[in-house]
Image: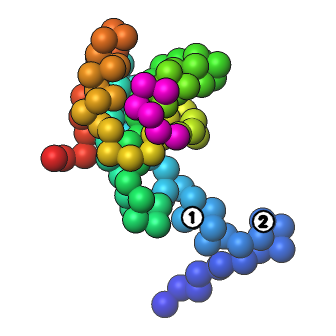
């Protein structure tokens, strides 16, 4: 059985680098479709609505997030080119984004 190196004095803990890569969003497609998905995994059981695939600049993304948070009446944040809104607001967010002219799909099943 080959040895698996888990620590290097130059790089530190190599397991963390592998884990971080596996946690990246599953949707990395840049096809012009905005995807809205409900997630609760890794969030202490709390449900959030995550918006992937927006091709906006950083300030435009922050402004859109602020508008969505205000209209949803919930908190949220922008992380790694995604908008995270607290609560299960997927259907409402899809309607709001369609009104703003985005091509939106609900992702992640039912």
Please indicate whether residue 70 sits to the left or right of residue 49 in the image. Answer: right
Residue 5 painted magenta: no
For the rendered model, the colour scheme is: rainbow
Q: Residue at the spot x=32%, y=38% of the render?
A: 89
Residue at 27% from the left image edge and 22% from the top image edge: 95
Q: Which mark is residue 66?
A: none
Q: Which mark is residue 18?
A: 1
Of residues 105 and 2, which is closer to you in this image?
105
Q: Is residue 84 above or below residue 47?
A: above
Picture coordinates of residue 82 (x, y %)?
Answer: 50, 35
Return the residue nearer the eye: 2 or 81. Answer: 81
Mark 2 surroundings: few (<14), some (14-19) or many (≥20) residues within 10 A: few
Farthest-out residue, right: 9
Q: Position of residue 86 (x, y in %)?
A: 45, 45
The answer to whether any part of residue 66 appears in the image is yes
Q: Is residue 53 above or below residue 80?
A: above
The quadrant where residue 29 appears: top left
In the rendered image, the vertical position of residue 1 relative to residue 84, given as above or below:
below
Q: Where are the magenta residues, as a range?
A: 70-75
Horizontal and vertical percent position of residue 11: 78, 65
Residue pointed to by mark 2: 11
Query: Percent x, y for residue 59?
Result: 64, 19
Q: Measuring 59% from the left and 81% from the top, which residue is drawn there?
A: 4
Q: What secondary structure is found at the residue carrying circle 1?
A: helix
Q: Measure the C-alpha gap from mark 1 to mark 2.
A: 12 Å
Say whether disc 1 or disc 2 marks the residue closer to the N-terminus: 2
Q: Judge the density around disc 1: few (<14), some (14-19), many (≥20) Cα neighbours within 10 Å.
A: few
Find out whether the residues at labels 1 and 2 contact each other: C-beta distance under 8 Å.
no
């Amino acid at each position: 059985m080959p040895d698996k190196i888990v620590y290097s004095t130059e790089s530190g803990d190599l397991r963390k680098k592998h884990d971080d890569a596996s946690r990246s969003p599953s949707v990395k497609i840049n096809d012009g479709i905005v995807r809205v998905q409900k997630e609760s995994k890794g969030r202490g059981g709390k449900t959030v609505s995550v918006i992937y695939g927006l091709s906006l600049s950083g300030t435009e993304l922050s402004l859109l997030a602020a508008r969505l948070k205000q209209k949803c009446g919930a908190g949220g944040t922008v992380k790694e080119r995604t908008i995270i809104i607290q609560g299960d607001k997927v259907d409402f967010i899809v309607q709001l984004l369609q009104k703003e002219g985005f091509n939106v799909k609900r992702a992640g099943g039912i």
